[in-house]
Image (cartoon, rainbow, N blue to C red):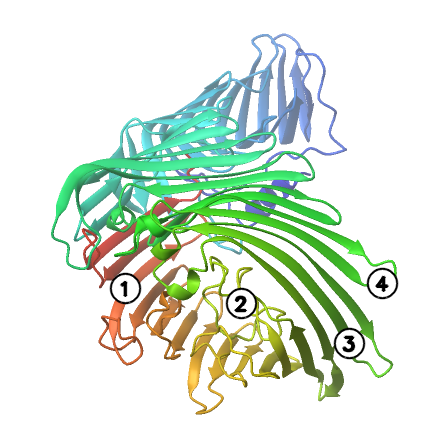
Amino acid sequence: MTRKGWIWLAGAACLVGGTARAQDLQDRPVEPPPPGADEPMPPTTEDVIDFSADALEYQNRTEVVTATGDVRMTREGTRLRADRVIWNRQTGEVRAEGNVAVVNATGDTVYGDNVRLTDTLRDGAIDNLLLVLGSGGRLAASRGTRTGDVYALENAAYTGCPVAEQDGCTPREPTWKITAVRVTYDESRRRVFYSGARLHLFGASLLPLPLLSTPSGGEGGPGVLVPDARISRVNGLEIAIPYYFKLAPNRDLTLTPHIYSNVLPALMANYRALTNHGAYQVSGMITEGRRLEAALNPIESERGIRGFLDASGRFQLSPRWSVTGSLRSTTDRTFLRRYDISRDDRLRSTISAERLGVDSYFALTGWATQTLRINDPQGQQPIALPELDYRRRLTDPLLGGLLELQLNTLAVGRTDGQDTQRAFAGFRWDLRRLTTFGQEVTLTAYGRGDVYNSDENALTPTVVYRGQPGWQTRAIAALAVDVRWPLVGAIGNGAQRITPRVQLVATAPVRNLAIPNEDARAIELEDSNLFALNRFPGYDRFEDGARITYGLDYGLTVPGMSVVANIGQSFRLDNRPVLFPNGVGLSGKLSDIVGRATVRFRDFVAVTHRFRVDKDSFAVRRNEIDATIGSRQTYVLLGYLRLNRDIDTAIEDLRDREEVRVGGRVQVGRYWSVFGSAIADLTDRAEDPLSSSDGFQPIRHRIGVAYTDECLDLGLTWRRDYQAVGDARRGNAFLLRLSFKNLGR
C-alpha cells in the first residue's frame, strides 16, 4: 500500500457508516483500493478487466457479470472497490454500488454512492461524489461526470484544507472552501474552473468570485492571486490585485496594480527566472505624483514619475567561478517610505565575480550607493569601480606555519567629492603551537606595502579623513604573539572553561595621516576587535606602536543552561600619539574595559549583554542588551542600546544615541495570536547635541492579531509612524493580510 493509501485507510477507520451529503468534504466510510501483491497485475489489453470478489454470478445469455462483497477491479492503472459491481460485457458499462472508491493512475481518488463507468473504469457518471486529488485538495458534488480527462461537477465545493482534527478522526469544518453551481476539473491541466463561485471563510459566505480558476495542487498556473488591502493616512485606502503569469516552467511574471483613494494608481511588476547556472529576479514599481523634498520641514514640491527598481541574481558558472549582483535604485528619497515598500536609508548596488579555489580566492567587485538620508549629499557617495582582491594560502615548508599572500586594488570615485585609488601587496604568517602545559601559542608576522593616489581632497568634510593629495606610499610591519591557556574542569553535572589570554603586538611607525581614509572610519573598541592585529575596521588605517592586551574567556555548560562571557583591556607600551578620537575607548595608554556575556536557559531564555566601561570614571560608555524570552508560540524580544562616548560632533560616523526596542507574540488560542513591536528614541541633547529627540521620541510601533493554520494566514495590523520625511508623513496605517496557503495561483 502506498503512503497515501495508508492515510486514507486510517481516516476511514475513524468514520461511521452512512450516506454523505452533497458538498460534504469529509472522508467517506471506505478506504480506497490499494495496490498489493495479492492483486492481479494490470492487464495489457483493453478488453480484459481483472477483478476479485467474495461472490460472482455470470449470466451467459446477457453476458452480465455481478460481483458482490469487497469487489476489486483493475484496468490500466485504474483501481475500483465497491460493495457490488455489475458489468455488462456487451455494452461495456460498469455499475458500482455501495461505498464506491476509484483510484486513477495519477493518484486521484473518487468516492461515490452509485458509479456508472465504461469498462475502461475512466469515463462515467457518479452520484454524491467526493474527489480527493493526489496533488492536494478535494472536491465534493451532488453529481459528477467524467469524459476523458475532464470532470464536470454540479453543486460542488472545493477546499485545500484539512477536514479532520489532528487525531485524524474528529471531523472539522475546513477553514475555507469555494462553492459553485458548476465546477470543471481538467486532470491534464491540473486546474479547477468555477461557475457561480463563492468564497466561504470560517463557515461564512463572504464574496462572489466570477470567472475563477485555481490549480488543483502542485505547480500553479496563471491567474489572480489573493488581493492585499491596507489603509494609511498618506495614501488612503489601498487595494492591490496581483496577476500571475507562468511564462515557462522556469520563468514567471507577476503584475500588481495598486489602487489608492488619495493618490494616483501604481503598477508593480516582479519577474523571476531560473537558468542552468543560477537564478535572478527583477522587481519594480512606477506611478506619477507629487513629491516633497526630503527634509524635516519640506517646502517645495514637484510632480513627476516616481518609482523604484530592485534586481538581484547569482550564477554559478563553474565549480570555481560565480557571479552575483544586485541593483537597487529609486527616483527620490521618500518613495520607498511613502508607499510602504522599505525603510532603508541607503540603497546599494553591487556586482561581483568570484573564484574560490582550494587554497586561493579571487574577487572583482564594484558597488555604488544611493543615499536616502536627509541632507546627505548624493555627490559624496562613493562609487567603487572596481575592487580587486586576490589571496593565496601556502603552508610554510620551513617552520610549518600558514602563509597568506594578498593583492588588493580599489578605485573610489564621487561625482562631487574626493576620488581615491589604492593598491597594496601584503602577507600574513601564522604559526600555532601547543606547549607541554597546554598553552596555545600563536606567532604572527604581518607586512604590507601601499600606494595611494587622490585628488579633490578638500571636498571631504572631515579633515582627518582627507589625507594628502597626489601619490602617497606607505609600509607596514607588525609582529605579534598570542597566548591562550584553556583550563577545563567539571562543575556539578556540567563543565566550565576558564581561558586567560595575553597578546603582545609591536608595529613599526605607520604613515597614516598622509593616506586618505575611505574604509576605516567607524572605529570603536569592542569585544570583537579587542585582540585584532589592527583594530581599525578597514585597510586605510593601521594601528602602530606596541601594546599588550589581556583578557579572560569563560564558559559554563550545565544541563539546561549555558554561559559564555569574555572581558578584556589593552595597554600601550609607548608614548606615541594615536589616531583614535576621544571617546572610542582607545585614545589613552590604557584602554577602556570591554566585554560580552551570553546566558541561555534551555530554549526559553537567551540574553546577550555587551558593554564598554570607561577606564577612569568607570562610566558605562556602551550598554547593549538583547533578550529573547519564551517559546516559538509565545515570546518577547527586548533590545536596549546606549552609546555615551562624548565624541566630537565633527566625527559624523560615531554619533551617540540611546534607543529601546520591544517586540513579542502571544498565543491566545490554537491558531490565534497577538503580536506587536515598538521602537523609541531615548537620545537627548546631552548625549547628542545634534539630536532633535527630547529624551523619549517614539519612532514607530505596530500591533496586530493573526490567525494561522495549515491552509490560511490571516492578519490585521495597525502601525503608526512618528517621523515625517518629505511626503512620507507620520500617521496610522492598517494592513489586512490574507493568504490561502493551498489555493495556489
Q: Which residue is mark 3?
A: 440
Q: Earlier in the sequence, mark 2 or mark 3?
A: 3
Can you tell which of label 4 and label 1 is closer to the viewer? 4
* Front-most of residues 618 and 131: 618
Label 3 crowding class (10 Å Cα cut-off): few <14, some 14-19, many 20+?
Answer: some
Asked if disc 2 and disc 3 are in contact, CB closer than 8 Å, the reply is: no
Quadrant that contains the C terminus: top left
Q: Earlier in the sequence, mark 4 or mark 1?
A: 4
Which structural element holds mark 1?
A: strand
Which residue is pictured at 40% across the width and 51% down the height?
Answer: 418
Q: Secondary structure at mark 2?
A: loop
Badge 4: residue crowd in 10 Å (few <14, some 14–19, many ≥20): few
Query: Residue 634 or 658: which is nearer the viewer?
Result: 658
Give left or right: position of 624 versus 207: right
* CB atoms of marks 3 and 1 within 8 Å: no
Disc 3 element? strand
**Residue under circle 1?**
700
Q: CA distance from mark 4 to mark 2?
A: 29 Å
Q: Amino acid at mark 2?
A: Phe
The amino acid on which the numbered mark 3 sits, given as a three-letter code, is Glu
Please state, as top left, top right, bottom left or bottom right, where the N terminus lies in the image. top right
For disc 4, the marked residue is 400
